[in-house]
Image (cartoon, grey):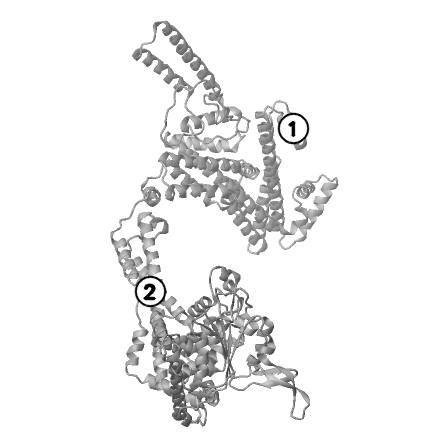
């Protein structure tokens, strides 16, 4: 029986091995076919760039073949595992192939069954099988009937392997239209020098991103601008003009938003505050109060905050003598008085009202001012809105000045009598009294404090409130300055192409001035805008505070027959023409004169031509003059010859 | 009905019983060898009269030693009756022949009770056995009799007994029915019902003779010489042979193959052949599996083996299954008969147990 078992085991192993070989060979053929198709696809269809696979990488080829072989081996092994060929099944297969009349399968089955094995016929059957198995030729016969060989299509895998190597080696990389566009994109984009517009946009982005507050406000525009720059650098190849046009568009959008930020209530209030603080007189004594006043005068709220901290330490400590304390308190009281005076100074508002043709006395009465602005017939809506904004910003700035004054007064009191925390509370009471009719000085302060910001009931936190207020002021200042700076820089950059540095500085200051929007009169702003336009020509337009608006007129379509068409290479430019009307007229007239000389015009038509074109030129000149006149005094973006 | 009682040849008479005292494999080999030699002599004896048709003779002998009945189907003149008659001559058994006709009554087959005077002068009902009371019965053109008469064979074939007038009469063993039918002349015939067909162990298709065989037939039958056939086996020997054949072993894989073969004929079954649903209306019964195994054992024994092989199964499958499978209308319309169906199933049936059935 051992002989039978070994023969059956041999048959089983060869059967499984054959299965493994066939399955693996089939799979490896299939996978090599895929590799071949992949190579051909990459080479002939030019898909390698898209797949980012080196088309002639030997490592890729070897790796692919090795992977195919590995997968084939694995699949073959899985196939063998899945078949689960038992010894009984192998014996049946062996019996069938060597035509042994099921001797081996019967012998194995009977040998495994003890009850059957005691039967004489069963033993005889087993003995027959054993005798049959003793045939020395049987081993060779089993090897013959259980061959381990490849299938009839064994040549497929070597042929495919050869084809893979040949394709890899000999088929050239085809540069398809797609890949021709895509592959060199990066290289061309890298090689192409950046246009001045792109550089300016980059600079503007960097500038804006320096201020986190400003960057947060302009997040969407910054993202769009970054994408534009990225596409210009890595995207499909564009003409320099296209890239410059895109950059200009993004820059215009950014400038518009920067102008909005610069024109916002917070920015205006911050400017007003700094302007007012610039008028502070500094204390004579060199102490912390002078440092605070100096910082406020400079508009450096960060330094002012540090000075406040030092003041708090000095007031709370015992290093200062009584005299020093009194001097310090006096200086603080003096500064507080100045701030209070500034908070009630109606000069700025009066000046603005005067510029707008309104009664300056309205600056003393905010309620009447609001009504007067609303009911004014001389002002258009834009001007009304601008005046209201300005009034609000002045009011906000004065409110902050008042708060600073109050806080400083409290700090002065604390310096005088350190450790008495109840004084602020008394001031709060005094504030209440003032509100109820007592016209005392401190009462008024307390009343304002309660009305404006409700600080009266927080009198114990004067140092902290001052710091918080200075923090807010510093934040507003930084955002306003960043917006102004970025806006001025971008506009200055545009101008610098055609202007000297001095002119650019002048335009920068003019731009900054115009961004303040309303400080000067209409005349001043108009001349500023004119300068900017004359210098740069294509800077972004924005509304002035006086309502001059740009309007795009829709051209009338002439319904006549089309007598000529001109093919223009490239993308048709779309947008607003900014060619001067005089230039157009000059070109037409010159063309007429040259045409009249070169091409004979019928005699009876010469007068008609001369009269028509001559009149046209005159009319253009007249229109040009008419257009130029208001442009001279027009604000930024005035009509430039439509 | 004729009773033959010739003496068996001396050497055969001296042989020990085929199934006696088989305690070890040597005795088994000896018994099997002696049986095989006797069977070969029987085969040669039949061959003296029946020319050609060797396959039919072999299958008839398988059925004889397997203890089953045979339905011989073939056109007239192919030697069916001669075969059965020769078999009757070669075996020391009682032999009867019934020519089935439409007016044949059951009593003509099983016998009847008649009123007779006994020795005392009294009238008594006495059973007069019919021709079925024999050991080899030739039911010639069995499909010409009415179903009522055909059914008279049912009990005899299955139970080996006959009940007449409330009395059951046992038939002598061995009892072998060899029925013939003509597949061509269907006019005025009564096809055997499935239940009766199932009683036949094998249905043997008798083919036309070859040219050489026909020459030999002419030579033998158109002269005055007649080949005498001496009895080779008697009833005891045949019963011993039947018991001996049943001791042949069949391994589980082979038996499982037989089971799957039978189940493959069941349309809609778990192991049904792919074409079973289209070609078969009714599949083979478990009696088919019994028939295959018992017949395959005889074949293995005659082949000198002690175990059944799948080749044995294949050899007997057609005869054992062709009358147990009812081809569908679609198959009959396509000209697909039972033999083709069985052949197709055998071709498609895997020797190994399907992996999903393990």
Q: Position of residue A109 (x, y in %)?
A: 43, 83
Task: Look at mark 2 in the image and give the residue it sits on.
Answer: A25
Q: Which of marks 2 and 1 is nearer the N terminus?
A: 2
User: Quick one: B189 or A329, which is closer to the camera?
Assistant: B189
Q: Does A211 sit above or below residue A3?
A: above
Q: How crowded is mark 1: few (under 14 residues within 10 Å), some or many (20 or more)?
A: some
* Subunit of label 1: A
Mark 2 vs mark 1: in front: 2
User: Quick one: A627 or A545, which is closer to the camera?
Assistant: A627
Q: How crowded is mark 2: few (under 14 residues within 10 Å), some or many (20 or more)?
A: many
Q: Position of residue A490 (x, y in %)?
A: 43, 36
Q: Can residue B253 be seen in this view?
A: no
Which quadrant of the figure has residue A440?
top right
Answer with left or right where residue B116 lies relative to residue A582: right
Residue at the image position 30 percent from the left and 83 percent from the top: A135
Which quadrant of the figure has residue B87?
bottom left
User: Quick one: B336 or A349, which is closer to the camera?
Assistant: B336
Q: Does B58 sit above or below residue A566?
A: below
Could you tell me which quadrant the N terminus of chain A lies in?
Answer: bottom left
Which quadrant of the figure has residue B82?
bottom left
Answer with left or right where residue B169 lies relative to residue A66: right
Q: Is residue B186 visible?
A: yes
Q: Disc 2 to disc 1, how far (Cα)?
A: 92 Å
User: Quick one: A216 or A430, which is closer to the camera?
Assistant: A216
Task: Look at mark 1 in the image and give the residue it sits on.
Answer: A374
Q: Which residue lies furthest to the right in this view?
A: A436
How many marks can you see?
2
Identify the secondary structure beneath mark 2: helix
Q: Where is residue A309 in the image (x, y as percent from the top left)?
A: 55, 51
> CB of mark 2 within 8 Å of CB of mark 1?
no
């Amino acid at each position: 029986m051992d002989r039978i078992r070994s023969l059956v085991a041999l048959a089983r192993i060869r059967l499984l091995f054959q299965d493994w070989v066939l399955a693996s060979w089939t799979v490896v053929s299939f996978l090599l076919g895929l590799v071949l198709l992949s190579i051909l696809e990459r080479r002939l269809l030019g898909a390698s760039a898209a797949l980012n696979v080196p088309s002639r990488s030997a490592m890729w080829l070897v790796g692919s073949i090795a992977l195919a072989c590995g997968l084939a081996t694995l699949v073959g092994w899985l196939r063998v595992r899945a078949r689960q060929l038992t010894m009984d099944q192998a014996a049946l297969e062996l019996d069938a192939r060597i035509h042994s009349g099921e001797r081996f399968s019967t012998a194995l089955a009977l040998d495994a069954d003890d009850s059957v094995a005691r039967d004489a016929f069963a033993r005889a059957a087993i003995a027959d099988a054993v005798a049959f198995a003793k045939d020395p030729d049987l081993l060779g016969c089993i090897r013959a009937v259980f061959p381990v060989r490849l299938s009839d299509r064994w040549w497929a895998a070597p042929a495919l392997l050869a084809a893979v190597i040949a394709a890899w080696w000999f088929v050239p990389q085809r540069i398809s239209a797609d890949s021709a566009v895509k592959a060199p994109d990066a290289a061309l984009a890298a090689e192409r020098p950046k246009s001045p517009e792109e550089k300016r946009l980059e600079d503007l982005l960097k500038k804006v991103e320096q201020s986190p507050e400003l960057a947060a406000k302009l997040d969407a525009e910054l993202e769009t601008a970054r994408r534009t720059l990225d596409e210009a650098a890595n995207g499909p190849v564009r003409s320099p003009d296209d890239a410059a046009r895109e950059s200009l568009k993004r820059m215009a959008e950014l400038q518009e938003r920067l102008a909005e930020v610069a024109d916002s209530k917070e920015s205006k209030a911050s400017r007003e505050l700094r302007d007012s603080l610039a008028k502070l007189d500094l204390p004579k004594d060199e102490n912390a109060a002078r440092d605070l006043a100096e910082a406020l005068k400079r508009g450096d709220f960060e330094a002012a905050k540090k000075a406040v901290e030092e003041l708090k330490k000095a007031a709370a400590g015992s290093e200062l003598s009584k005299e020093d304390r009194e001097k310090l308190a006096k200086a603080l009281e003096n500064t507080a008085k100045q701030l209070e005076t500034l908070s009630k100074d109606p000069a700025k508002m009066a000046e603005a009202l005067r510029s707008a043709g309104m009664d300056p006395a309205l600056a003393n009465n905010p309620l009447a001012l609001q009504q007067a602005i609303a009911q004014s017939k001389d002002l258009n809506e834009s001007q009304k809105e601008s005046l209201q904004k300005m009034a609000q910003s002045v009011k906000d700035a004065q409110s902050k000045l008042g708060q600073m004054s109050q806080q400083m007064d409290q700090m002065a009191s604390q310096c005088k009598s350190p450790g008495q925390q109840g004084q602020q509370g008394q001031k709060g009471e005094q504030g209440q009294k003032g509100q109820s009719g007592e016209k005392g000085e401190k009462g008024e302060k307390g009343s304002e404090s309660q009305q404006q910001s409700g600080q009266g009931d927080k009198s114990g936190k004067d140092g902290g409130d001052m710091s918080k207020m200075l923090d807010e002021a510093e934040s507003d200042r930084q955002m306003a300055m960043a917006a102004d700076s970025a806006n001025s820089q971008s506009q200055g950059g545009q101008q610098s192409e055609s202007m000297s540095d001095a002119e650019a500085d002048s335009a920068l200051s003019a731009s900054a001035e115009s961004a303040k929007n309303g400080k000067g009169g209409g005349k001043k702003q108009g001349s500023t805008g004119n300068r900017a336009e004359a210098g740069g020509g294509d800077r972004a337009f924005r509304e002035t505070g006086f309502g001059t608006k740009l309007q795009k007129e829709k051209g009338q379509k002439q319904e006549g027959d089309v007598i000529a068409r001109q093919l223009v290479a490239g993308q048709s430019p779309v947008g607003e023409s900014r060619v001067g009307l005089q230039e157009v007229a000059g070109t037409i007239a010159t063309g007429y004169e040259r045409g009249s000389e070169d091409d004979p015009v019928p005699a009876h038509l010469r007068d008609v031509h001369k009269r028509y074109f001559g009149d046209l030129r005159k009319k253009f000149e007249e229109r040009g003059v008419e257009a130029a006149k208001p442009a001279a005094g027009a604000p930024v973006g005035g009509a430039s010859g439509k | 009905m004729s009773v033959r009682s010739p003496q068996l040849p001396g050497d055969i008479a001296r042989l020990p019983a085929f199934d006696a005292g088989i305690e070890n494999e040597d005795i088994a080999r000896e018994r099997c060898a002696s049986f095989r030699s006797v069977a070969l002599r029987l085969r040669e004896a039949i061959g003296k009269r029946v020319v050609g048709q060797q396959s039919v003779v072999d299958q008839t002998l398988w059925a004889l030693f397997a203890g089953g009945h045979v339905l011989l189907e073939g056109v007239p003149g192919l030697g069916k009756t001669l075969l059965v008659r020769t078999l009757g001559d070669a075996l020391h058994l009682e032999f009867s022949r019934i020519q089935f006709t439409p007016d044949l009554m059951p009593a003509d087959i099983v016998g009847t009770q008649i009123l007779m005077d006994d020795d005392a002068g009294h009238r008594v009902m006495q059973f007069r056995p019919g021709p079925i009371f024999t050991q080899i019965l030739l039911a010639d053109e069995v499909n010409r009799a009415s179903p009522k008469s055909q059914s008279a064979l049912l009990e005899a074939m299955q139970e080996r007994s006959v009940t007449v007038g409330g009395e059951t009469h046992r038939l002598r063993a061995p009892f072998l029915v060899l029925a013939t039918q003509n597949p061509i002349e269907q006019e005025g015939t009564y096809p055997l019902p499935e239940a009766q067909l199932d009683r036949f162990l094998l249905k043997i298709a008798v083919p036309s003779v070859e040219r050489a065989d026909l020459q030999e037939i002419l030579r033998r039958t158109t002269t005055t010489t007649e080949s005498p056939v001496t009895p080779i086996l008697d009833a005891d020997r045949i019963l011993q042979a039947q018991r001996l054949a049943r001791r042949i072993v069949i391994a589980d894989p082979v038996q499982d193959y037989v089971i799957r073969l039978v189940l493959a004929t069941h349309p809609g079954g778990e192991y049904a052949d792919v074409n079973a649903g289209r070609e078969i209306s009714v599949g083979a019964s478990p009696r088919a599996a019994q028939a295959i195994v018992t017949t395959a054992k005889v074949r293995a024994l005659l082949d000198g083996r002690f175990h059944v092989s799948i080749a044995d199964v294949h050899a007997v499958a057609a005869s054992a299954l062709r009358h147990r499978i009812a081809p569908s209308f679609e198959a009959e319309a396509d000209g697909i008969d039972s033999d083709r169906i069985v052949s197709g199933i055998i071709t498609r049936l895997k020797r190994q147990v399907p992996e999903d059935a393990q």
